[in-house]
Image (spheres, grey):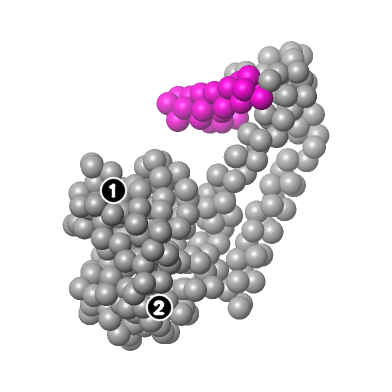
Amino acid sequence: MIGVGSMGGAILAGLRGPEVAIARPIRVTTNSAASAAQFAGADDVVARAVAEDPEANRAAVAGAGLVILAVKPWLILDTAREIADALEPGAIVVSVAAGVPSAAIEAVLPAGTSVVRTMPNTPSHIGRGVTGIAGGANASDADVALVRALFETVGSVLVVREDQINDVGAVSGSGPAYVFLFVEEMIAAAERRGFTPEQARELVQQTLVGSALLLEASGEDPAQLRRNVTSPKGTTEQSVLVLQEGGWPELFDRALAANVRRAKELEAQ
């Protein structure tokens, strides 16, 4: 794994779970020595810092059957070029970067290299992520299946066409940020109703967590669960009407469209 920042770190945290059956140790590289030092003494991870060893990335991928590029989008192609002639023949290269088409990565790697794009999200930290994956031009069904199995160790996986990856990013990749923004605003509103910050957080956080667990456990449609709480002419109905009058459908459409638009701008660069 090249890069263990926010997303790479989430994936790595999931892969290090004791119930995950993969070959170890996992070789990773970091920018700084301080970041690499957090893995000192670990028997399941070997970390090298690029700041201390300019050959760290190339050494990490040597002999690896699967390489995850978890660097920032603007570094993906340079990193791919750097490791190109150090890759094991037949290695699968996985990108977790938004806005970088698989064709662009394939173009700087040895001819025929399998590239698989993925769009995970940060709940992968706790094994509850969801990842969209799409194979590039050279990726076989077996390659995609292997990458799927890898990411299923940190959550659920949806195989999509590559032209859907940006939409996956808009919905689930960025989705945790939307949820956390909702929590922020609900806590702030509760505080304005007179609750202490601690009380407001407990009320909102436990409501959100409990509702999410109910949604998962019940298997019911979310609209039905909402109706179960919303008695006709009751208090909940009044709140829901205000929210609906705020134009939520249009707001979500605009938010997702802005996300996809930015991903396409990155692709064009």
* Quadrant of the frame with the C terminus: bottom right
Please, what secondary structure does the residue beneath circle 2 have?
A: helix
Which residue is at the front of the view, 5 or 49?
Answer: 49
Give me the disc on residue 16: 1
- Tell me where residue 226 appears, x and y as whole percent: 62, 25
Residue at figure coordinates x 47%, y 50% from the top left = 121
* Dot 1 or dot 2, earlier in sequence: 1
Q: Which residue is mark 2?
A: 80
Residue type at the position of mark 2:
Ala
Residues at discs 1 and 2 in contact (Cβ within 8 Å): no
Boundaries of the magenta span: 197-225
Residue 123 appears left or right of 83: right
- Tell me where residue 21 appears, x and y as whole percent: 20, 49
Residue 94 visible? The answer is: no
- Tell me where residue 51 appears, x and y as whole percent: 41, 71
Q: How many marks overall?
A: 2
Residue 41 visible? The answer is: yes
Whether residue 169 is situated above or below residue 127 in the rendered picture: below
Residue at figure coordinates x 28%, y 48% from the top left = 16
Give me the disc on residue 72: none
- Tell me where residue 195 appears, x and y as whole percent: 70, 18
Whether residue 149 is situated above or below residue 64 in the rendered picture: above
